[in-house]
Amino acid sequence: MQVGLFNGADKPHDALRVLANINRLIEKARHSQIPIFAARHTGPADSPFAPGTPLTQLVPELKIDNSHDKIFDKTRPSCFSGTGLGDWLHQKSIDELVIAGMKTEFCIDTTCRAAADLGFRPVLISDAHTTMDTPILPAPAIIAHHNRTLNGPFVKLISTDEYEFWHQ
């Protein structure tokens, strides 16, 4: 949910609805006192997505609170690769991980699979992730394919309306 992807030349499918759903999830998590982690994908120092550049910033409409939420950078599609996320989750005794954001076929897919491999219980929010059209497939088909493929073997699939956080 970064400026460079969300507001880029290629518009994400159903962007405002997905953003609203993610914000609803954030509000539900806060109400249940559940920690929130937000990843920013960064590129090499000489790229437009270099760490700290405007394109890597989270969209301002995202209800992330810099003073309370854990915001971290990643350089790979997996939120776990080289980030410390797994350690942070273990330190807080978190085993269920709610996954939402962008891009479905890259970071969402890879993080879901990695979370399951690392022993977490990933929950993919079916209506809170998005991507852009590609030359081969339209975004709705990519999203539907990943929801179907990941559900069961890798994640529990549930909608924003249906998901409820519970305090451990």
Image (tube, rainbow, N blue to C red):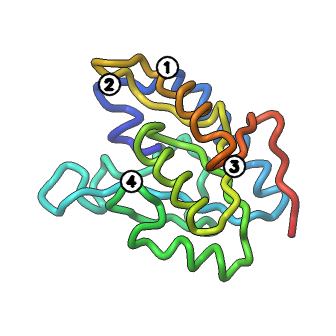
| Number of numbered discs | 4
Nearest the eye: 162 or 151: 151
User: Disc 3 to disc 1, how far (Cα)?
Assistant: 20 Å
Q: Report which residue position mark 2 lands on.
A: 10
The part of the image, by quadrant, that contains residue 95 is: bottom right
Q: Residue at 61% across / 65% down in the picture?
A: 69
Is tag 3's residue or tag 2's residue first in the polypeptide sequence?
Answer: 2
Q: What is the C-alpha distance between the residues marked 3 and 2?
A: 27 Å
**Quadrant the C terminus occupies:** bottom right
Of callouts 3 and 4, the N-terminal one:
4
Q: Mark 2 or mark 4, which has the lower sequence index?
A: 2
Q: Give whichever of discs 3 and 1 has the lower sequence position.
A: 3
Q: Amino acid at mark 2?
A: Asp
Tag 3 residue: 123
N-terminal-most mark, 2 or 1: 2
**Image quadrant where residue 44 sits:** bottom left
CB within 8 Å, label 2 to label 1: no
Determine which of the numbered discs, if any, sits on residue 37 in the image.
Answer: none
Q: Position of residue 4 (x, y in %)?
A: 33, 41
Q: Position of residue 149 (x, y in %)?
A: 57, 35
From the viewer's perspective, is 63 left or right of 114?
right
> According to the image, label 1 marks what residue?
141
Q: Disc 3 marks which amino acid?
A: Val
Whether 138 is drawn above or below 64: the answer is: above
**Residue corresponding to mark 4:** 77
Tell me the mark number nearer the camera, choosing from 2 and 1: 1
